Image (tube, grey):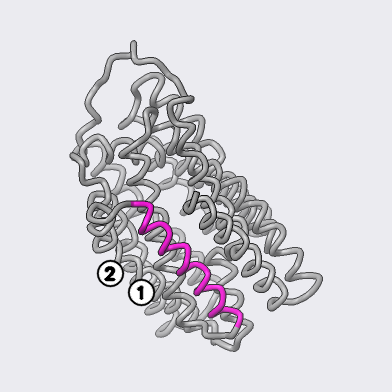
Amino acid sequence: MGYVVAIATFISYAFRVLFGYLSDRYQVVKPFVVTGYFISAVTKPLLYMSGSWQSVATLRGIERVGKAVRSATKDSLISAYSAGKSGKTFGFHKTMDIAGELTGSLIVFTLLFYLGESEILFRNIFAFTLIPGLIAVVIVLFFVKDAPYKSKAKTFDLKKDYSLLPLLFVYFGFVFFMFNDSFFLIKAKEAGIATTYIPMLVVLLNLTQTLLSYFIGVKIDAIGAKKIFTLSLLFGLFATVSLYVNFIVIGFIFLGVFIVGSLNALRAYISEYAHNKGTVYGILYGGVALFGALGALVTGVIWKHYDAQSAVLFSLLGMGVVFVGYLFELSE
């Protein structure tokens, strides 16, 4: 499981540095967003025909390439129209994004509850994802305005963005040690939660993010991105502690707060201070790729050779060290 998660996670983000740079260098924004959504829209339904974990990993990888193409440039597009309220803007975007995932999870839960678990049902669910995927492509293509054009004479100088790197690496450290939602779900299964109710935990995770994203975005604009980022790291620690003591439901709520708070705070911070926004967004997501993939591999190995509690303890101790180091940096 660790290898599959690592492959999907790495490909999901590794190319984002490249496309973020290309966006800055050639002033290409909306075309990358449209292309990325199209790749994901046509790839995900192919899981209907998948017959092995290798094919699942391959298709997931291709689908994540679509995200790689669009994500950094999408954030640049949002930043172009945030008008000094990037926290609120990114909060609203995340609310809409997660609301879509929440709706999908509710549909899956309803189908499983009334029709029961079967392979053909799971395959059909993947096949029907083609419809919302293509709708998204049409909306972006015809109803979203491109970013304002800037002179290509603008120099590319990453040195102007070096001051952002320490905060990014704190986040990368948490991403390395933090369980992603896939491992949270496996831990829930091991804790005795029935398979039929596992999708409801996904609903809870998404609902938490949906309800809090805009509110957190407003607070980012009001008190600053760094303060919200720091509080979000604490919720990441609380989520892992909850997992360790088998408070699964509370753990998923805290995980949702960590995800939406930390990421929105960083996106707003980059929007405010980055010189090369597309590139820095790409570095953000590329770092998440590298450290997320390595973290998933290490977690999978510890889980396999020891047990789930050992993996959770490793995660908790690692995040604790990163957080203490971050506090020392803030105090200097």
Q: Which mark is residue 217?
A: none
At mark 1, the secondary structure is helix
Picture coordinates of residue 187 (x, y %)?
61, 77
The chief SS type of the magenta part is helix
Mark 2 Cα within 10 Å, few/some/many (few <14, many 20+)?
some
Classify the position of the N terminus by image quarter.
bottom right
Q: Is residue 89 left or right of residue 13?
A: left
Q: Which residue is mark 1?
A: 106
| Residue 240 covered by magenta stretch | yes
Q: Which residue is mark 2?
A: 211
Picture coordinates of residue 120 (x, y %)?
52, 70
Q: Residue at x 44, y 46 (%)?
A: 40
Picture coordinates of residue 202 (x, y %)?
44, 72
The amino acid pointed to by label 1 is Leu
Query: Which region shows up in magenta?
Result: 225-244
| Residue 267 covered by magenta stretch | no
Say which of 191 and 169 sits in front.
169
Q: Is residue 265 left or right of residue 50?
A: left
Label 2 or label 1, whichever comes before in sequence order: 1
Report, in whole angstroms, how far the alpha carbon at label 2 lies from the one at label 1.
Answer: 16 Å
The amino acid pointed to by label 2 is Leu
Figure check: 37 above or below 208? above
Q: Residue at x 64, y 59 (%)?
A: 51
Mark 1 Cα within 10 Å, few/some/many (few <14, many 20+)?
some
Figure check: 110 above or below 7? below
Picture coordinates of residue 329 (x, y %)?
52, 50
Say which of 58 and 82 sits in front.
82
Q: Residue at x 71, y 64 (%)?
A: 300
Say which of 33 and 89 sits in front.
89
Q: Is residue 218 visible?
A: yes
